[in-house]
Amino acid sequence: MRSSRPPALQLFSYDWDRAAFDACAGRVRFDHAGFDLFSFPSQVGLLGFDLDRFTDRLVRRAARRGWQAVVSHHEQFGALAAALLAERLGLPGASPDAILACQHKLHARRVLERVAPEATVPCEPLPVGYGETIPEGLRYPCFAKPVKAAFSVLAREVDDRAALQALTRFGWAELWIIRRLVEPFERIARQRLPEAGTAHRMMLEQPVQAPQYNLDGVVVDGEVHALGVVDAIMYPGTQAFMRWDLPSRLDPAVQARALDVARRFLGAVGFTRGCFNMEFFHDPVSDRLTVIEFNPRLASQFGDLYRRVLGLDPHSLSLTLALGGGLADEPRREPTAGATSSFVFRAFHAGQVPPMPSRAQRAAFAARFPDGMLLPMPKQGAGLAREFKWLGSHRYGVMHLGGRDEAELRRHCEEACTLLGWPLPYAEAWTVDALGQPQLRLRPDSRWPAGQPVLRA
């Protein structure tokens, strides 16, 4: 007997996306395509990857499978591939041109300067290619980042010419990976957004020192709606995320201003349907709001947070949008938490990467927190070294928990960290030494070697 569930396609869905969409399997019959950039042998798919050829193959497959929706929240390839395929098949979705305009960070900055100049900072393209000699005369400090990248790769503040030169100098293996990550986007951008210029370069921005936030929302037939704001909490003395907290502590009036900026930008680039995430700073002293970047897809890591606190499933909502529906078609459930966080565990020195939880530790965590989420992310060898260079740290695990309020959430996190043998991701557990280097405040029961630096700025 043929299923009554409509067929749909997931592209590049792994980790949070795969688990969240699996929970929607009662609504649709999912097929999958794409590969995992972070695991072997799946990542071999990067060899010769081309978005046009990939889309052509999916169009032929669609003739047999009859997909009625295509979804992806994968930053590197998936969001653009989904838009290209939806356009070819006549399905609801974001315009590929809008995806390109958001993901080309230099072009997006220029659009923002035109439509919301009060929310942008001065920027310029780095006038040389990777590894070439950095010219004299640039202003420091500056914040450098790739024109096209994801996960904050190679994005950091640099204090002088030598630091910028070191950041942009790569070995042959690193250059091979970088070029193959960017080139599929570059080919499509050359065809459809030639005025943006090449994405094979870095850009420099004026640094901003202020608390960071994320506005999450959806656009339905051109109408922009906010889901909420998630607060970014950093490891002391670094630009590395330690936690993502919901609900936000940001003044609702500032949240409304952020939504207004998003409306202007998304309207300017023609983003009319889909999920979006706007990263921004807000300085509580000057009251200035500054956009970091726009992501034309759901911030997948936050989906579980909204499910806990709002009773709204953003992944399910994104599927509803892909099927042609709207906000009114998406049901809400009873919230399970008053406060929740995505805890990010990092090592900042290769010699201080903690062991991954044993099977017994993971079982103990699951028994104590049946609704908790734990994602160990081990790396070793060249992959580990590359992550330290590109990100300045190694993200070895992510944990999601909820509580009735912030106090209970904190107690749950302390208990979970004790079970796992991992350091506590709260600022009170860390300090910064006289040289400005963050250090973990060691407790008597800590598994870290006494007197050893845990963190290197």
Image (tube, helix red, strand yellow):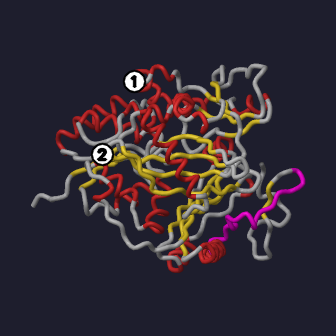
Q: Is residue 368 above or below residue 144?
A: below
Q: Residue at x 68, y 62 (%)?
A: 354
Q: Residue at x 81, y 57 (%)?
A: 453
Q: Residue at x 75, y 54 (%)?
A: 351
Q: Which residue is more in the foreground, 342 or 227?
A: 227
Amino acid type, residue under disc 1 in the picture: Arg
Q: Position of residue 267 (x, y in %)?
A: 42, 36
View extreme (right): residue: 434
Q: For numbered disc 1, what is the local secondary structure?
A: helix
Of badges 2 and 1, nearer the viewer stands 1
Q: Is residue 386 magenta?
A: no
* Residue occupied by mark 1: 192
Q: Position of residue 60 (x, y in %)?
A: 22, 35
**Which mark is first along the chain, 1 or 2?**
2
Q: Is residue 270 above or below residue 273?
A: above
Residue at mark 2 to residue at mark 1: CA–CA distance = 21 Å
Q: Which mark is residue 70?
A: 2
* Image quadrant in which the N terminus is located: bottom left
Q: Which mark is residue 351?
A: none
Name the quadrant containing residue 91. top left
Along the horizontal axis of the image, is 229 left or right of 451? left
View extreme (left): residue: 1
Q: Position of residue 360 (x, y in %)?
A: 56, 75
Q: For numbered disc 2, what is the local secondary structure?
A: strand
Mark 1 closeness class: few <14, some 14–19, many ≥20 residues within 10 Å: some
Amino acid type, residue under disc 2 in the picture: Val
Magenta residues, start to end: 419-435
Residue 82 shows in this picture: no
Q: Position of residue 218 (x, y in %)?
A: 40, 49
Along the horizontal axis of the image, is 443 left or right of 396? right
